[in-house]
Amino acid sequence: MRFSLNFIREMVPVSCEPRELARKITLLGLEVENLEPVGDDWVYEVEVTSNRYDWLSMVGLSREVAAALGTRISLEYPEIRTSPSLEGFILRIDAPDDCPWYLGRRITNVRVKESSARLKERLLHSGLPAVNNVVDATNYCMLKWGTPLHAFDADKIQGNVTVRYARDRESFVGIDGKTRTLSSQNLVIADAERVIALAGVMGAQNTEVTGETKNVFLEAALFAPVRVRRSRRAAGIESESSYRFERSVFPDYIEYASEEAARIIERDAQGEFAGCVCAGRKPEEGKKEVILAGEDLRRTLGVQVPEEEVEGILSSLGFSCRRNTPGTLTVTVPAFRLDVDREEDLYEEIIRVYGYERIPATLPPIQPGTGKESLYSFKQKIRVMCAQLGFQEVVTYSIGEEDSLRAVCERDPVTLVNPLRAQETALRTTLFPALLQVLRYNRNRSRPDLSIFELADRYGVEKTGFSEIPTLAFLVSGQREEFFTLKGALREICGRLNIADVEFREITRAHFSSALELRGGGTVLGWAGKAGRKECDAQGVSGHVFYGEVDVEALQARQRPLRFVPFSQYPAVSRDVSLIIRPPARFQQVRVLIERRAGSYLEGLLVVDRYTGKEIPADAQAVTVRISYQSREKTLTSEEVDALHTGVREELQNQTGILVR
Amino acid sequence: MIAREEIAQIVQEFETDLAQAGSAEALEKIRIKYLGRKSRLSRMFAKIPSLPPREKGVLGKELNVTKQKIAAKLEEKSQQNAQAEEGMDLTFPGEKISHGGRHLLSRVLEDICTTFENLGFSVKEGAEIDDEWHNFSALNIPLEHPSRDVFDTFYLNLPAQGKGKLLLRSHTSPSQIHFMEEASPPFAIVSPGRVYRPDQVDATHSFMFHQVEGFAVSEHIRFSDLKGVLLRFAKTYFGPGVELRFRPHFFPFTEPSAEVDISCFSCAARDSDEKCSICKGSRWIEILGCGMIHPHVLSACKIDPQRYRGFAFGMGVERIAMLRYRIPDIRLFYENDVRFLEQFRS
């Protein structure tokens, strides 16, 4: 909202310097976002919060300025003419809930021309264009009183006027020249033939005041905020008028605005007042009284504001106070403060004038929490762990593109009703496309290989509605072996969380050329695999890409407290065995067999070399496994180790697909 | 030859020999030659008893000093030789140690939460898919009212449930409602997380961003407590020199409400009249909104507003990170350029 200081000065003497005034009203809650001199005037740009409809008028702003300066406004109310009645003209309201009151005035024999310099300046400095002396009079009064008005060319109105809901697919051409198709959502002003205004939003072109206009019909009415909101949203228009109606207008000022606009038109356009017409009635507002207890004020704010000061502040804002029982006041709310209903509203009125800076800063006595690990702290722990394991965290958008999500995940995504951009239409069912996108972004900037993770929710449509699952996702790119970095990280995380019975099982997974399932504590925790060529190509990513997802809540549920595990006091002895493994044999068989054969003497096994290529069959792999033998009871002799190792070798030799070298 | 001249000669010869000695063996030979039992110095020591008493002390002292000097120089040389053999050129650059790290937003979010945890708050996250009742109505935001306009919202193609249509939460305040529905006062909670609004993406707007919501309810909470908690937060997070300014504002879910500015740390550091790019010359930077929880909100959660009072506040994590780390564009957080990520590893 913009306002001109000269306009304000018509109602309140401003003694202080314009910048100082800006500071003062900002601290009252009317935040000045910009201030600049224009000629001999100053233009203020202020943020009007949605509760303060009254700050959309110069009268309301002047009240605030007066309160900031400790003075009062002087406002002249024009004398309202209620006669003569317009003969032979019928005004009917068919929608009394959404238009309780409509007031029309007719001014004849006007001469439409430019407005006076003063009037034009008032409009321009408040951000409204100057049009002509009739339209400008209505806009001036809207600015001053906060109540939108509309002037019709009376000769273009055919027959009687009705306030009604639009018919389905009724057409409306606004003064902006654009055609809109209406529905029953829209409240309209219509004559016998057609729509002549979208009520509270915009007039129609067919009855617009032009240079040829001789007679004017001036509308002042009360339209319901929700109806105007629905109507302008359905029509896709927002106007100065609808902006005010949505935030409420003060019924008392409708008559003043209408009367003053008529008088300006009579004066500036040499028109003659021909009479008025009225339908409905002004809604009766009851007197609002709020009981204010000083003790409650102190309990809420934490500061004792003396009763005299409370009374002084409230009266400067137009409230009147009556002392009741000791310590309480009965406060009468001025009729124009539609936003004040209860004690808490008064607290804010008091404190914004008293000054927030005068409230002391205290610390509340807070009961500490239970100490139970929250999902939040678990997630933080996992983030630190992944970073320690060499992965870089990324943060990507939770909303992705529906088709590219479907291309890599079977689950049905939750789609947006009102997406902003074509690339964000659905909540992601997997973090894979987003992490792949990070890889592509960095590859385009000469960072070919990444090890990244993200901890965020994934979502999906479920029979019961929807799911939102905190997910830990990894993406690694580079050589084939990098997969085992990812696999190692998963095992390490499970190890640090002391999850029982951690194992990987080979699974088939759509869109991945090979994949493992991660199990622990008797349940599936996640999976990891090598992304399919087609899926990577679709995203423009070449090379090997490995990706995995872990269910964070499952991890948290399966973690166990760390406990010391005794280790052997005796030395471990290692022996290598070199093998060629050829499908369908898998390394897993080798592991299981060694574990079974070496039993409790197995301290650990390590793959120290892996080779594919010349000298061995194309689909086979040569591996060297280092086996560590150890006993808990004694130092194993060389002969004992050899016996164990020979046993292992023989057993391996007996397996199909495994050749011991 | 008088004794003093002989000593000078010995020292000179020693210096020449020492300069040429490269190996440990050569040094040992020199040691034996000059300090050994058969050395000239030893022979001179042996002559001392036969000297007249006047000269005895003088020569003895001089011989001792010389002996120590030679021993020290030998030791020094021996260490130099050892370094030449074992030592390294340490002026080569340190290796680039490239491990992983957390994203800056994780760190900022944690730093903010930790500040409040240290004041006794607990952290509780909320869900991102929510309904109209929790996102709006329970927070005293009517569904058809201009106060909703700042909370433009993504709606979801999911069947509406008892609490209205489903949506992506447009702020973290619904966490307040979810928590208060379950818990009974007193409590003090911070709730961080992602929020979504259909805002056109530019340098300061994103359709997804992070907020931290905080709230405390008890029989004795006052606005002054809110001030104290936020002041402590600002001083811990931005530095002990910052001040706070509370400006009256309107939020449907708090009454009274305020916006909070911190004194511009950039102006304070520079102390110049030039227009500061961070605060635009106003010396204040808005960082959060806050207020006393509206009685309607407490009632919606079945908490008696006559008995209990509460405060609430909310802040944008990206905005705070941008201020603190001087990040010019919000999109940098989500592009995940490794060159950005690596600058803020933690």
Image (spheres, coloured by chain):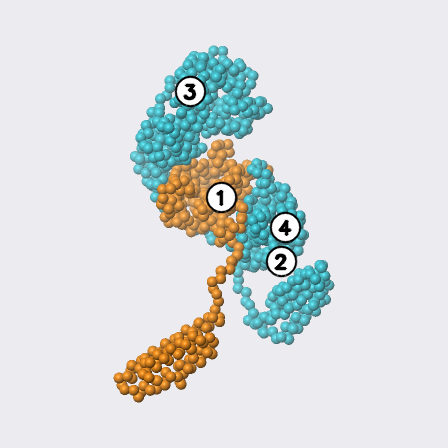
- Chain A color in figure: cyan
Task: Where is residue B191? Give x, y as percent.
Answer: 48, 46
Q: Residue type at mark 3: give it.
A: Ser
Query: Residue furthest toward the front?
Result: B1
Task: Where is residue B303? Give x, y as percent.
Answer: 45, 41
Report, in whole angstroms, how far the alpha carbon at label 1 lies from the one at label 3: 46 Å
Whether callout 2 and callout 4 share a subunit is answered yes
A354 to the left or right of A381: left
Q: Which circle marks residue B329 in the picture?
A: 1
- Chain B color in figure: orange
Q: Secondary structure at mark 3?
A: loop
Q: Earlier in the sequence, mark 3 or mark 4?
A: 3
Asked whether the beta carbons under mark 4 and mark 1 sit within 8 Å of each other, the answer is: no
* Vertical placement of residue A604 versus A7, above or below: below
Report, in whole angstroms, how far the alpha carbon at label 2 lies from the one at label 1: 37 Å
Q: Which circle marks residue A115 in the picture?
A: 3
Dot 1, crowdedness within 10 Å: few (<14), some or many (≥20)? some
Tell me which residue sits at (55%, 54%) in the image. Answer: A391
Asked whether the beta carbons under mark 3 and mark 2 sit within 8 Å of each other, the answer is: no
Quadrant where the N terminus of chain B lies? bottom left
